[in-house]
Amino acid sequence: MILLHTHTFSLSWASALDLLLEAVLDALKTLPFLFFAFLIIELLEHHAGEKLGRFFARSGKAGPAVGALLGCVPQCGFSVMSANLYAGGVITLGTLISVFLSTSDEAVILLVAEPGRRLEIFRLLLTKVALAIVAGYVIDIISRRRSWKTPGKISDLCDHEHCGCHDHKGVFVPTLIHTAKVFGFLLLFTILLNFAVAFLGDERLSHILLTDSVFQPFLAALVGFIPNCAASVLLTQLYLEGAISFGSVIAGLCTSAGAGLLVLFRENRHVRDNLKIIALLYVCAVIPGVLLQLFGV
């Protein structure tokens, strides 16, 4: 039994075990969906990754639109590839930003795994893709084009995350590695959320997360900069729990470019340019998030 007082808090072993069991069961429900989603992604990467990369690099003026569509593919592989292509002068700044904004990492997979919430995938993706396309073209209009050369590959994702999954042949071992990694994050955050709600209470937790505040998207967008799938897992779980708004999850997922930002700093030696890209990404994520928050979307 959880006992919550004004200044004290006590949690019995039985209640703690109940919270842990609930978190494990909730996370296990997503496991089959995670595995099959990553299996499909691995199959696409092995058999069509380089073709998609070449198509992406040759998209020309359609770059922001193509980048926005490819960026919403689960995992941050295309954000990694776009960072390499931008550093090599193959794609424009607008295309890079459009990919980063539309990248949702594992958010889509988690929504697919949540019964009764799957229709929200289209709402989330359509919003992010629309924002990415508009922002990409506006940025291309006002920015200068670059002329460097060094294209990248979608497989750079694993190289920079050092997960070692592509040291193995085939698709099943990489699928298991990525599934285990995301499942671990999901289980961890589910446990933390359960205990946070029990310890803090709904009212205090809502206050910390700035619930119903116009400033919540600012906070969510900062969380999105965590450079791996932990950010998208955390933001999606908070949204599913009702702790953050749709505008906030959009703001957070728009900055959640995964390993793409790490690769950008590694491959693009112009640090000031990279900092401007981060600032631009933050602004492009926060403004729509705040507007969605204000209009109660």
Image (cartoon, grey):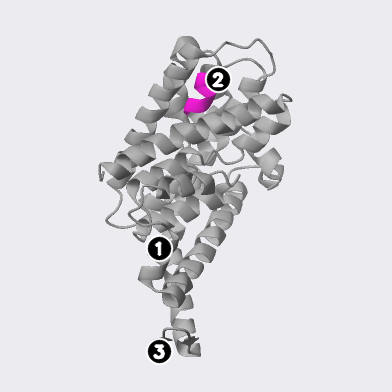
What quarter of the picture does the N terminus occupy? bottom left
Q: How many marks?
A: 3
Closer to the camera in the image, 176 or 136:
136
The residue labelled by disc 3 is 1
Of the numbered discs in the image, which one, if any, rests on residue 78?
A: none
**Three-letter amino acid code at the position of disc 2:** Leu
Question: Of callouts 1 and 3, which one flags the residue occurring earlier in the amino acid sequence?
Answer: 3
Q: Is residue 102 above or below residue 252?
A: above
The nearer-to-camera label among 1 and 3 is 1
Q: Quadrant of residue 227?
A: top right
Alpha-carbon distance for marks 1 and 3? 24 Å
The crowding category of the residue bearing disc 2, from other C-alpha atoms within 10 Å (few below 14, some 14 to 19, many at least 20), is: many
**Three-letter amino acid code at the position of disc 1:** His
Question: Of callouts 2 and 1, which one flags the residue occurring earlier in the amino acid sequence?
Answer: 2
The residue labelled by disc 1 is 207
The residue labelled by disc 2 is 93
Alpha-carbon distance for marks 2 and 3? 55 Å
Question: Which residue is found at the position 65% from the left and 10% from the top?
Answer: 147
Element under label 1?
Answer: helix
Q: Is residue 153 above or below residue 137?
A: below
Magenta region, main secondary structure: helix
Magenta range is 93-98
